Image (cartoon, coloured by chain):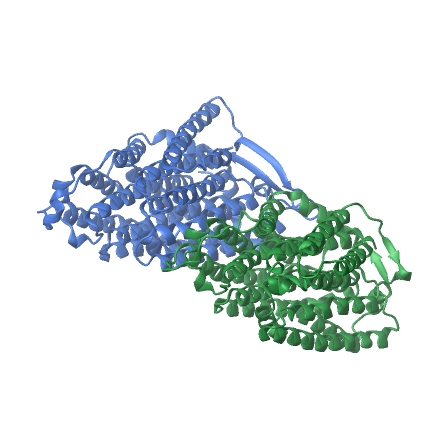
Chain colours: A green, B blue
Amino acid sequence: MRHELLLTLAAMLVLIAEIFRTPGKTSGIIIFSIVLFAVVTGIGFFPAPTGVLFGGMFQNSPLTIIMKNILNIGVLIIFIQSYTWLKKDENLEKSGEFFLLIISTLIGMNFMISAGHFLMFYIGLELATIPIAALAAYERSKSQSAEAGIKLILTSALSSGILLYGLSMIYGTTGTLYFSELSSLIGANSLQILAFIFFFAGMAFKISMVPFHLWTADVYEGAPVNVTSYLSVISKGAAVFIFTIVLFTVFKEIVDLWQDVIYVIAVLTMTVGNLFAIRQKNMKRFLAFSSISQAGFILLGIIGGNEMGMASVVYYVLVYIFSNLGAFGVVSAIISKTGKENMDEYNGLYHTNPKLSLLMTLSLFSLAGIPPVAGFFGKFFLFAAAAEQGFYILVLIAVLNAIISLFYYLLVVKSMFINKNENPIPGFKSDFMTRLALIICLAGLVVTGFVSYVFEFIRSLSFGL
Amino acid sequence: MFALMAGKNMKQVRITAAIGMSLQLILAGILVYLYLTGRSAGNTEQMMFYEHYVWYESLNIGYTIGVDGISVAMIALTSIVVFAGIFASWEMDFLSKEFFISLILLATGVFGFFISLDLFTMFLFYELAVIPMYLLIGIWGSGPKEYAAMKLTLMLMGGSALLLVGLLGIYFNSAAEGSALTFNIIEISKHTIPMEAQRFFFPITFVGFGVLGALFPLHTWSPDGHSSAPTAVSMLHAGVLMKLGGYGCFRVAMFLMPEAAHEMAWIFIILTSISVVYGAFGAVVQKDLKYINAYSSVSHCGLVLFAILMMNETALDGAILQMISHGLMTALFFALIGMLYGRTHTRLIHEMGGLMKVMPFIGVCYVIAGLASLGLPGLSGFVAEMTIFFGAFQHTDTFHRVVTVLACSSIVITAVYILRVIGTLLLGPVTNSHFNHLKDAVWYEKITTVSLIVAVAAIGLAPLWLSDMIGDSLQPIMEKLGILI
């Protein structure tokens, strides 16, 4: 419960600080919020009590705590990255809102992850979704941003409706919504299978799995880049966590059924996401589609349905946070300095901004699963989890997809290193905050892979599932 | 141990790179010496200098390293080629710092691969060796470099995709029911992987490594990649990286899954004989010097895989010798071609002629490389090919006889293209008057060629110590393959 309380406290403090702010003048609130959140993140790492609250509605296990900590780290990086962008004149006025909205979605996600009851799960899900729509429409003067907001809210509403319909069927057939009781009650009843499919479809919207991914690219492109990175990393990560937990606990009796479903969806998600990503010219859209295919890889960990799968999913989300935020960090730094977001404008970037290009390359390699960065380890464990259950063909399809993804990641590398450009993006020095965020990502990329303790720790916690 | 040494060498300028690599070469020499004295002192362990650090405990992944005679030989080969490669790219002026860093990263991957005894670490180093290739070819290459770089990277990564599945398959079958799974090659070799698993994973693993070893029909990255790469990279790639494929086929696919290897060898024997002959014919019709060499590499590497599949001690011995000999000689070729191209700005053989008169040093070296390639006694090529065919002929059935004769015919074809090149390129009148002013090799180019030629000749004249060193280490593998001759 500590994470949720701390976050609520932080949200309130930000609100209060907002009141006492001298209008139009200081950027103090940005610094204040970042420092505050850093403290919250830090406290999250202290050992916390585990157990069940509210008569089983809320459960806290070491695993959910580590999940929340992972999300906190990601949000902290995003906050630091947003510093430059928020300091712009048109955003300064409403910078408090940015923090407030993100923190409240984070509270929602935390409740969602810790849910022990579908009602709690649903409340958390909604709390995690609605403020994001406001965030996507954050740059309200831009029509693209407003469009992104409305698209997001409509698709979320639809997916929530489908999900609720599924939940009502579960309640109708079993008479309870407690996870602990449901796990023994759900069997091969056909209405329950229908309920599972509705639940699955609802979650698939959130994780943007194919064929429920159509909203992703437009929203990602329209929303401000920092919100996009939040959507593609944190929001997706949280949804993956709870999805995994529910599949492994509530639906564990029909594991054969959902393995088949995930098999097909995983292949579709990876392949379609990849094939679309190849054709993208806009960096934000490009990363959007690549993040769709990343979701497909994550499904490989889920399909194992075992302890290794759980550990590899959690670990991969951590790695994915560092890699994707590294890539988004570079994109965001370049957008805020020059406003350029197309791939061919990156031509010759290495000659003017070698450090940014190197970091971008490492992040992309990590997304593609190339050693020595952490993505290699993450992918390897995901594949190992699927292979443990004998899904060798699926692993083969996945690795071939990883090669396709390597192709388009290399296209970016190529434009940065090899292509010539008459007027490349001029060399610039980023400010302290941007660099700090990028350094954290870089450290994460290197450390999480080589230091086996991270994975071993997550794995040791997955036992209690 | 060696990975660390290579790691320390990541300094910036060419001097440092050269010093680092010389150091590396000396260390490799010391390693060979220590190894030989260790063995003669009666050390009969399978792997020497064995070290093991637990890395990912729950998956039983370790950083396990150790060397036997084969890996020692491969490390020595790598050090020589890298050493020569550094000098061959002495005049690299565009982004030279990045060039040397990538080159050394590539070398790190190769060294790491040869010393790894853990499948996971081995795979990691393998990918580490492949990725810098993209930048090395893409940035510093020539011709259709972007296409070649992309093709090469994707095809090799495709190979590694198969490999990953194969390795996971081996891992999950690596121990009897109930005991701990492991990635450690030595541990796995003590256990027999179930036959049905072997049937599925042997071809996957073999093809996965075979892509890198230019197994027909997956060799097409090789000509494009080699011809577009800068000199040092061609040297390293043809000389060393392609050997990763052969070494892997042999150390992982055959060693760990011997039963399936026996059963399926015939498929791959046919493919490799096609490689051998097709590569040689391919080389005959090419006009570009680098393409000729790339195809001849396909042919020679095909011979390596061919010999491995013969599965007797003589042929395996020959396979390792051929890896080393081809590594040295092809590196020499690519270095010389780089020098010629740097002077004449063409690689088409019909545009050159009479270069022996203008550049006697390079000319003579080229002749030596050519003769080594076609297997003249006294040079390394002869020893290797002789051993391979001798081993292959020990099989008395018709199938093996036929493919062996076919593969032998490649020697003749090799002679055709080598002599044709030497004839038009070096001998005869000087066709282009501009060529009259060209200078002969300078000191750093001489270091490159001489070091390689010395090694080629050393193996050719005194092959026994090397062959013994390899032969000792073949024992456990032969036992595993169940054919002691």
Q: Residue furthest left?
A: B429
Q: Residue at x 41, y 29 (%)?
A: B23
Q: Nearer the viewer, residue A267 or B4?
A: B4
Q: Nearer the viewer, residue B100 or B349?
A: B100
Instruction: Give how far across and how far down residue B410 sits, in percent.
Output: 27, 51
* Residue B355 placement: quadrant: top left
Reply above or below: A181 against B288: below
Q: Is residue B190 left or right of residue B304?
A: right
Instruction: Give how far across and how far down residue B86 sits, in percent.
Output: 35, 38
| Residue A437 visible (yes or no) | yes
Reply above or below: B38 against A348: above
| Residue B58 visible (yes or no) | no
Q: Is residue B163 left or right of residue B419?
A: right
Q: Residue at x 33, y 52 (%)?
A: B141
* Residue A309 placement: quadrant: bottom right
Q: Residue furthest top?
A: B41
